[in-house]
Image (tube, rainbow, N blue to C red):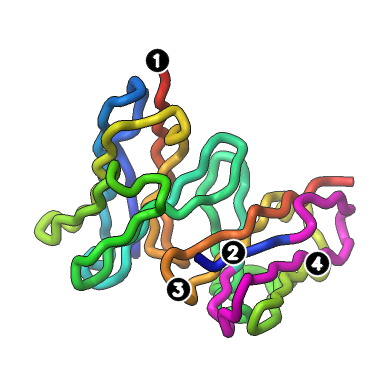
């Protein structure tokens, strides 16, 4: 199975901050990488698919980059509704696997 | 509009069984890979099982031999039969057409 490693596991930031979360795959997954946002009690919500494509309806302050094994999710200016847990997920091969999550908290 | 609605969760004793259902609308379950993903309380997302368009299936090692994924094309339903349940199977179970569409989840609690 492909292992996905996210960092950091948690971070504290203020409204307006630029936030970067990284995700590393244990082998090349080309651009088969998705990013999700999850709030307590809710299902994951797709933000970015295919490493850098913004899902319809998702604010443009979210962006994704990377290919191969190293990927990044960037929030350009953190907003109050962005405090949540973020997961990366590879869909290059079965089983699909997820990173362990990054919790973004209010500083 | 695509919708996935899970049901069938609840409290079950260790060693017991439960069948989860996922009602799909807006597309046909046989037209795409359909997954079950779970999330233990306070933990991350864990893939459980997939059924492919051709009907073949795959399982996480942690549930292999105990869980069975299936679908009913005539009812447009996805199922997860869970047998020999353990405390560590306690989680919210999501039906998902990864990556875009997820259900709201159904809670399974395995406890005596």
Badge 2 crowding class, 10 Å Cα cut-off, few under 14, some 14 to 19, many 20 or more, is some
Q: Quadrant of residue B84?
A: top left
Q: Is residue B84 left or right of residue A77?
A: left
Instruction: From the image, tell me which residue sits under label 4.
Output: A20
Whichever of labels 3 and 2 marks the residue nearer the N terminus, that label is: 2
Horizontal and vertical percent position of residue A21 = 76, 65
- Disc 1 versus disc 2: nearer the observer: 2
Q: Quadrant of residue B17?
A: top left
Badge 1 crowding class, 10 Å Cα cut-off, few under 14, some 14 to 19, many 20 or more, is few
Given the image, what chain letter belongs to the residue carrying mark 2? A
Given the image, what chain letter belongs to the residue carrying mark 1? B
Distance, label 3 to label 2, CA atoms, is 11 Å
Instruction: From the image, tell me which residue sits under label 2.
Output: A3
Instruction: From the image, tell me which residue sits under label 3.
Output: A93
Distance, label 3 to label 1, CA atoms, is 37 Å
Distance, label 4 to label 3, CA atoms, is 26 Å
Instruction: From the image, tell me which residue sits under label 1.
Output: B112
**Same chain, marks 3 and 1?**
no
């Amino acid at each position: 199975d492909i292992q996905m490693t996210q960092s950091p596991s948690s971070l504290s930031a203020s409204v307006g901050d630029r936030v970067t979360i990284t995700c590393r795959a244990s082998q090349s997954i080309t651009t088969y990488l998705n990013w999700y946002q999850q709030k307590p009690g809710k299902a994951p919500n797709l933000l970015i698919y295919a490493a850098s494509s913004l899902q319809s309806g998702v604010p443009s302050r979210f962006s994704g980059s990377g290919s191969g094994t190293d990927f990044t999710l960037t929030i350009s200016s953190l907003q109050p509704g962005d405090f949540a847990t973020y997961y990366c997920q590879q869909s290059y091969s079965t089983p699909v696997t997820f990173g362990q999550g990054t919790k973004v908290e209010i500083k | 509009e695509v919708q996935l609605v899970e049901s069938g969760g609840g409290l079950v004793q260790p060693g017991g069984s439960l069948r989860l259902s996922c009602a799909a609308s807006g597309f046909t379950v046989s037209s795409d890979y359909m997954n079950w993903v779970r999330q233990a309380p306070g933990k991350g997302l864990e893939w459980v099982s997939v059924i492919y368009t051709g009907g073949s299936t795959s399982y996480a090692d942690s549930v292999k031999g105990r869980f069975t994924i299936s679908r009913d094309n005539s009812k447009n339903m996805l199922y997860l039969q869970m047998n020999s349940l353990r405390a560590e199977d306690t989680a919210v179970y999501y039906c998902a057409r990864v990556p875009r569409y997820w259900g709201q989840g159904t809670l399974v609690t395995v406890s005596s």
